[in-house]
Image: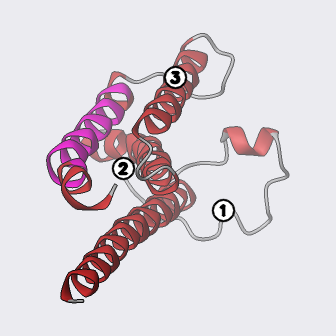
């Protein structure tokens, strides 16, 4: 009798942990996406790739935060949206395919190829923008840091309890 109740409680704990991890990844994905969009909106000019696809809204230039056009701040502002959007995609993939490691790896590889292709397109003039070494470094750093956190903290817990 008690053994059955214990296994039900352990199953509930595992399910709750899995749901909590997925919810955390989803929230991180949304926050990263919103932060990347906010940086674009508040700091960048109107020469964005999105305006080649959709019409730019009239209010676009109204709420800009003034900043120096040279120096480290500009480099960070220009690189931040790319790595935030990459982080958003990574977190969304981790959320959707939480316990399916092989599927995660395939979709993450596709996401990384898209990010590299986007930057290569900028280099070759196919996509508006400039290829910055800092873009590649920050995107690689975010992917590496998230991967390390996932391997040492999340996957270890998954293997022990959840999946």
Query: Who's the residue at 50% across and 36% down the image?
Result: 103
Q: Do the residues labelled 1 and 2 touch (CB within 8 Å)?
A: no
Question: Where 139 falls versus 16 (above or below)?
Answer: above
Q: Does the magenta stretch include residue 125?
A: no
Which colour style is shown? Answer: secondary structure
Q: Which of marks 3 and 1 is nearer the N terminus?
A: 1
Q: Which of 154 and 67 is in front in this view?
A: 154
Q: Nearer the viewer, residue 21 or 9?
A: 9
Q: Earlier in the sequence, mark 2 or mark 3?
A: 2
Part of the protein shown in magenta? 136-155
Other-residue count near label 2 (Cα within 10 Å), few / some / many at <14 / 14–19 / ≥20: few
Which residue position is annotated with label 3?
113
Marks 2, 3: nearer the viewer = 3
Which residue position is annotated with label 2?
68
Q: Residue 61 carries which label?
A: 1
Q: How far apart are marks 1 and 2 (CA)?
A: 17 Å
Percent across and percent down for residue 156 are 18, 49
Query: Who's the residue at 69% across and 38% down the image?
Result: 49
Q: Name the chief secondary structure element in magenta.
A: helix
Question: Where 162 falls versus 142 (above or below)?
Answer: below
């Amino acid at each position: 009798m008690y053994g059955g109740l214990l296994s039900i409680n352990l199953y509930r704990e595992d399910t709750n942990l899995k749901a909590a991890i997925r919810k955390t990844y989803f929230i991180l994905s949304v926050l990263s996406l919103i932060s990347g969009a906010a940086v674009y909106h508040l700091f960048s000019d109107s020469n964005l790739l999105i305006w080649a696809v959709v019409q730019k809204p009239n209010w676009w230039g109204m709420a800009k935060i003034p900043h120096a056009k040279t120096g480290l701040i500009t480099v960070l502002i220009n690189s931040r949206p790319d790595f935030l959007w990459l982080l958003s995609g990574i977190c969304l993939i981790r959320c959707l395919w939480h316990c399916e490691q092989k599927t995660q790896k395939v979709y993450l590889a596709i996401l990384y190829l898209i990010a590299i292709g986007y930057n290569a397109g900028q280099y070759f003039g196919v996509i508006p923008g400039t290829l910055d070494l800092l873009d590649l470094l920050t995107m690689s750093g975010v992917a590496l840091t998230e991967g390390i956190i996932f391997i040492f903290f999340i996957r270890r817990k998954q293997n022990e309890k959840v999946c």
